[in-house]
Image: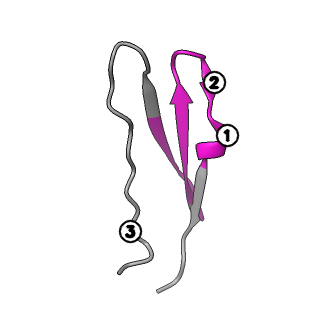
Amino acid sequence: MNKNLVNIHTPTIDAKKIYTNSLYIYKDKIVIRTYDHNNGIWLQALERTFPFVDV
């Protein structure tokens, strides 16, 4: 299994809950943040950071 492979899943969108995953690509890392549109907040508990690793 490739350690660099990540599944980015957004829950099923329905009329009750709407989330968006955003990918921020920097020179040294990728940050994935999840935004809760119903509450207007970023979900800190779901934030993930993946540094670039030399292969």
Q: Position of residue 38 (x, y in %)?
A: 53, 15
Q: CA distance from mark 3 to mark 2?
A: 27 Å
User: Is residue 10 positioned above or below 14 on the image?
Assistant: below
Name the residue type under label 1: Gln
Q: Is residue 9 visible?
A: yes
Q: Residues within 10 Å of mark 3 (few under 14, many from 20)?
A: few
Q: Which mark is residue 44?
A: 1
Name the residue type under label 3: Leu
Q: Position of residue 29 (x, y in %)?
A: 57, 61
Q: Which residue is mark 3?
A: 5
- The first of marks 1 and 3 along the sequence is 3
Q: Nearer the viewer, residue 25 or 38?
A: 38
Q: Residues within 10 Å of mark 1 (few under 14, many from 20)?
A: few
Q: CA distance from mark 2 to mark 1?
A: 9 Å
Q: Is residue 27 visible?
A: no
Q: Which residue is mark 2?
A: 41
Q: Position of residue 13 (x, y in %)?
A: 33, 25
State the extent of the magenta-drawn residues as a range: 21-47
| Residue 23 painted magenta | yes
